[in-house]
């Protein structure tokens, strides 16, 4: 048998923690000296202690831990819980990283107010283009809603195009519209395809072929870096539109000139916002 101090040392926990676990009935000592009150533990109790600590670290309350260990959870079941919790923590960490990037982008926007560069804005026309696309609906136009779905949707579109033997004829395009039910934004991800592909077709592989209409006038600006940091660039374009006698007539398209794996700092995106002269009807 081990004294409570020795057992704590072998279990890599504190004596205070063992006393608390005893008090709530989570891990009772194997024997308590009736005269001194000293607690003694057996080596076999380390197995229960290990399960208690693992479950506690997974985020379960001590009451939940007790219910689980009393059911004699196997090592494999614990491993499954650990995998699930690890995936949750990784997702939370990724979300926190993306959130921090968005906050940093907003701060840069605030810091640069009143002195934004506008020399990179170009006005041009955009021809009609036939695309293969997938679509999904999200809650808002914010990067926090669009970012998590756009990349996977592009990956899925690439997979389906490959399965159908359809080769992209240009860089990826992302465009938006209000959801018909008024409940958010429809995100469309697309690749240009050859005009031999039929307009209006819904392929058995699960994508549609549509023609994006020509836009006679767009104000464009090039964004360098992650899409999580697009707000300052988009607002630079908005300042230019407001200062140069134009008004926006809809959501911008995003054309991904350089995008994919690797450092997002190397990504290049052209924002194409449809505009008209402010004095003209729309």
Image (cartoon, rainbow, N blue to C red):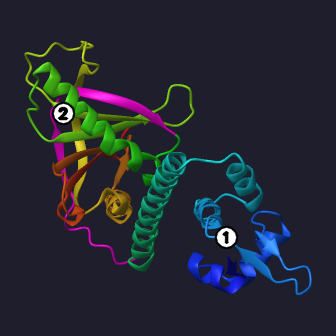
- Per the model, the C-alpha gap separating discs 1 and 2 is 66 Å
Residue 72: percent from left, percent from top: 65, 48
Mark 1 or mark 2, whichever is nearer to me: 1
Q: Main secondary structure of the magenta part?
A: strand
Q: Residues within 10 Å of mark 2 (few under 14, many from 20)?
A: many
Secondary structure under tag 2 reads: strand
Residue positioned 29% across, 60% down in the render: 226
Residue positioned 32% across, 56% down in the render: 227
Quarter of the image containing the C terminus?
Answer: top left
Q: Can you say whether 280 is above or below 132 in the image?
A: below
Highlighted magenta segment, given as a residue range: 114-138
Is 203 left, or right, of 102 in this rendering? left
Q: Earlier in the sequence, mark 1 or mark 2?
A: 1
Q: Can you say whether 135 is above or below 20 in the image?
A: above
Residue positioned 74% across, 61% down in the render: 62
Residue 204: percent from left, percent from top: 25, 12
- Residue occupied by mark 1: 42
Residue nearest the observer in this picture, 78 or 190: 78
Quarter of the rendering containing residue 13: bottom right
Q: Which mark is residue 191?
A: 2
Q: Can you say whether 143 is above or below 155 in the image?
A: below
Is 27 left, or right, of 9 in this rendering? right
């Amino acid at each position: 048998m081990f004294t409570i101090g020795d057992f704590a040392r072998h279990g890599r926990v504190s004596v205070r923690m063992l006393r608390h676990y005893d008090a709530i009935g989570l891990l009772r000592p194997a024997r308590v000296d009736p005269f001194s009150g000293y607690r003694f533990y057996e080596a076999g109790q380390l197995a229960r202690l290990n399960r208690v600590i693992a479950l506690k670290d997974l985020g379960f309350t001590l009451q939940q831990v007790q219910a689980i260990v009393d059911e004699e959870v196997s090592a494999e079941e614990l491993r499954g819980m650990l995998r699930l919790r690890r995936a949750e923590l990784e997702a939370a960490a990724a979300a926190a990283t993306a959130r921090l990037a968005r906050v940093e982008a907003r701060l840069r926007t605030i810091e640069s107010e009143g002195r934004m560069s506008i020399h990179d804005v170009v006005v041009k026309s955009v021809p009609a283009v036939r695309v293969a696309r997938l679509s999904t609906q999200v809650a808002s136009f914010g990067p926090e809603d669009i970012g998590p779905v756009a990349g996977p949707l592009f990956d899925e579109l690439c997979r389906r195009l490959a399965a159908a033997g359809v080769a992209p004829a240009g860089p990826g395009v992302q465009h938006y519209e209000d959801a018909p039910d008024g409940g958010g934004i429809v995100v469309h991800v697309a690749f240009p395809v050859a005009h031999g592909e039929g307009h209006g077709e819904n392929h058995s592989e699960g994508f549609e072929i549509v023609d994006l209409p020509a836009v006679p006038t767009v104000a464009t600006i090039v964004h360098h870096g992650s899409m999580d940091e697009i707000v300052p660039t988009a607002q630079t374009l908005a300042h230019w539109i407001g200062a140069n006698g134009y008004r926006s007539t809809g959501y911008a398209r995003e054309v991904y000139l350089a995008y994919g794996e690797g450092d997002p700092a190397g990504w290049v995106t052209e924002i194409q916002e449809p505009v008209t002269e402010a004095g003209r009807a729309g």
